Image (cartoon, rainbow, N blue to C red):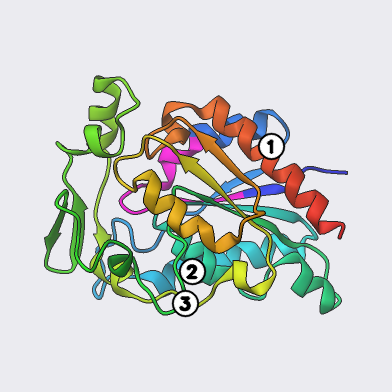
Amino acid sequence: MSNPTVVIIPGAWQPAEAFEPFGEHLRDVGYPTEVISLKSVGGTETPLAGLKEDADAVSEVLTKLADEARDIVLLCHSYGGVIGSCAIEGLDFATRRNAGKAGGVILTVYMSAFMLPKGMNVLDGLGGKPMPWMKIEEDKCFAVASELPQIALNDMPAEKAKAYSAQLTHTSVSAFATPSTFEPWANAIPCTYIFCEIDNALPLPVQQQMASQLGPNATTFSLKAGHCPFLSMPEQLRDVIVKASEVGLSRKAI
């Protein structure tokens, strides 16, 4: 049996290239990996792309891979959790099997990610307004680079954290203000959550509250990590994704 293909959805402000080194860790152990480039990140054409365009881009990749009869593990980080929730509708393995099609998403993995009830948006999940370390300039939202080493990269060496912070760009404000349209966990789609225990961007209690929607018997994982374990502990995260993939494959057989 071949390993699932891992599709990674980055969070806000992050170029896809930031995940490529982690993608190589997965490929090295036999897991094909694709990283989505988000339309809402770094865009220059107005109006800026938002959640719908991001979800459409992910759905396009998922459809292509599913039509190749691949099993897919969807790894969603931060804002990427909203994108993944919206993009997966109709593309999970069970729905496709019931339609006489092969392939599909066997597991959605939320990694310190927003699991929003249908109708809520990211700003709702943040209490109704941007965090103090988020800066709004017209239709663009930036993360304040000088604050990120303590907010999102607090488990990394200072120089590495500073260098990564300088690579980040803007996300469209509309991406944070657009409601989520689908709840995979409420539609019998297998999901799991990776808790980042020392995350200051999306604190552990907030992660736990969102993950509680999975129910008391959900399989979850924990890393003693800040917001970006794909940067700070890629080998440990790789091992968690391998374990999660095994969970997904076992549920596929049910």
Percent of width and height locating residue 211: 51, 56
Label 2 – label 3 distance at C-alpha: 14 Å
Q: Tell me which numbered mark, 2 or 3, is placed earlier along the sequence.
A: 2
Amino acid found under the numbered disc labelled 2: Ala
CA gap between label 2 and label 1 equals: 25 Å
Label 1 element class:
helix
Magenta span has 11? Answer: yes
Residue positioned 34% across, 63% down in the render:
40
Magenta-colored stretch includes residue 81: no
Give SS at disc 2.
helix
In this picture, residue 106 sits left or right of residue 214: right
Pointer 1 or 3: first along the chain: 3
Q: Secondary structure at mark 3?
A: loop
Determine whether label 1 and label 3 are within 8 Å by CB.
no
Q: Quadrant of residue 241?
A: top right
Q: Which residues are magenta?
A: 7-20
Amino acid, disc 3:
Lys
For discs 2 and 1, the disc positioned in front in the rendered view: 1
Q: Position of residue 219 (x, y in %)?
A: 65, 48
Residue at image mark 1: 242
**Label 2: few (<14), some (14–19) or many (≥20) C-alpha neighbours in 10 Å:** many
- Residue for badge 3: 118
